[in-house]
Amino acid sequence: MKALAFNEHGGLDKLRYQDVPDPAIGPGDVLVRVRACALNHLDLFVREGLPGFKLPMPFWTGCDIAGDVTQVGAAVTNAAMGDRVAVNPNLHCGRCEFCMKGEQSLCVSYGILGEHVQGGLAEYVRVAGDKVLKLPEHVKYEDAAAFILVNMTAWRMLVTQARLRAGEDLLVIGVGGGVSSTAVQIGKLCGARVWVTSSSDDKLERARALGADECINYAKEDWVKVIGQKTGRRGVDVVLENVGAATWKGAIRTVAKGGRIVTCGATSGPIAETDIRLVFWKQLSIIGSTMSSDAEFNTVMGQLFAGRLRPIVDTVMPLKDGVEAQRRLAEGKQFGKIVLTP
Ligand SMILES: [Zn+2]
C-alpha cells in the first residue's frame, strides 16, 4: 500500500509518499481502509524524533482516522465488514490500576495510534477491534477525522478536569490550533463566556464565528491588562493553556481567585516561572490533561453525531500532497484541521 512515510527522523525532506508493506491483523483487530486522516502537531514531533522513542522504519504517523472496515479478526464482535467507523486512538494495557478505573489516558503504558505504532497516513491501518466506533450515515469521513483527537483532548480538559460551569469565564490562549479552536465551542456548549487571544485578526474573526465573546489581539494589546480591565480586576475562572512558556505567567496573573488553569501542551517551550505566592493566595488549581478516556471519546463523538459540536476543517488535501500539508501545519497557517484523504 501507499503511505506518507519516513525512513529516518528529520525534517520535511524525509517524508515521502511511498510503498510500504500492508498491515496484517490479529484475531482481536480490524483492518480499516482509511478514507480521511487529520494532521496534528504530534505528526511533526514524531517525524522529527522524540528522545527515547524507538520506532520501526519506515514509519508513518496519523492519529485521527475515519474509514471503512475491510477485514475483521475472528475474535472481534463489535465491528463488521463495511462498517463506516471513527478510530479511537487510545493504546493501553487494559490491566493496570488506571485502566481498571476506566482512565485509559493515565495507563502506565499509554500510547497513541499513529505515534507509538504506525497510523493512518496510509491506505490501510490495523486497529484493535474495540477501538472503532460506527459513524452515522450523515457524518462525513473528513469531518469525523478532523474532530477526534482535539475534541477528546478539549472535552476532558474543560468538562472533566476543569469542571467548567455555566456562567463562568473561560480564556482560551492562542486560538487557531485544533484544541484551542474547538475549546471555544465546547466553552459555549457549557454556557461559559469565552475569551480568546491571537496575534491574527483573521483567527479572532474565525473564533468569533464559533461563538467567542471577547477577542483580544495580543500583538496590538496587552491581553493580561485588557482582561483585568474588562473583568474589574477579577480575572477568568478557567484558562485553557497549551502555549507554555510564552504565556504561562500571564495565565497565572489572569486567572481569578479559586480559578483553574488546565494545560495540555507547551508549544513555545516547557519551562516557565510560577510565582507560588499567587498559586496559594489565589487558591489556584493547575491541572494537566492528556487525550481522554474511552468513555470521554464516546461522549464527545456523540456531540458530533448530534450536531452539538462541529468539526473545524481548514483544508482537505490528497494524501500524496502530505508534505505540503505538513508544511502548512508547521507554519501555523491553518485554522482548524488539515485533513488528508488517501
Ligand atoms: Zn493500563
Image (cartoon, helix red, strand yellow):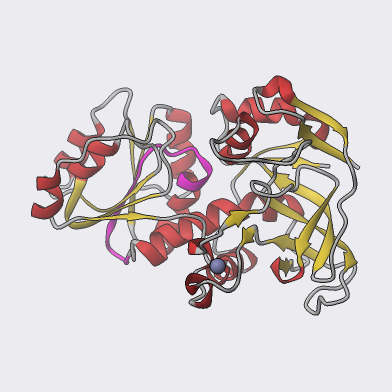
Q: Is residue 176 magenta?
A: yes
What segment carries the magenta color? 165-180
- On the rendered image, what quadrant is the N terminus found in? top right
- Residue 270 falls left or right of residue 24: left
Up-down relation of residue 200 to residue 160 (above or below): above
User: 325 or 204, which is in the foreground?
Assistant: 325
Up-down relation of residue 249 to residue 91 (above or below): above
- On the rendered image, what quadrant is the C terminus found in? top right
- Residue 298 falls left or right of residue 323: left
Instruction: Estimate the x, y position of residue 69 in percent, counting from the top left.
Output: 85, 63
Instruction: Estimate the x, y position of residue 214 in percent, counting from the top left.
Output: 32, 43
Q: Is residue 189 magenta?
A: no
Instruction: Estimate the x, y position of residue 42 in percent, counting from the top left.
Output: 58, 40
Residue depicted at x 53% and y 66% = 293
User: 12 or 21, which is in the foreground?
Assistant: 21
User: 104 or 321, which is in the foreground?
Assistant: 104
Residue 104 showing in the rendered view? yes
Residue depicted at x 53% and y 68% = 296
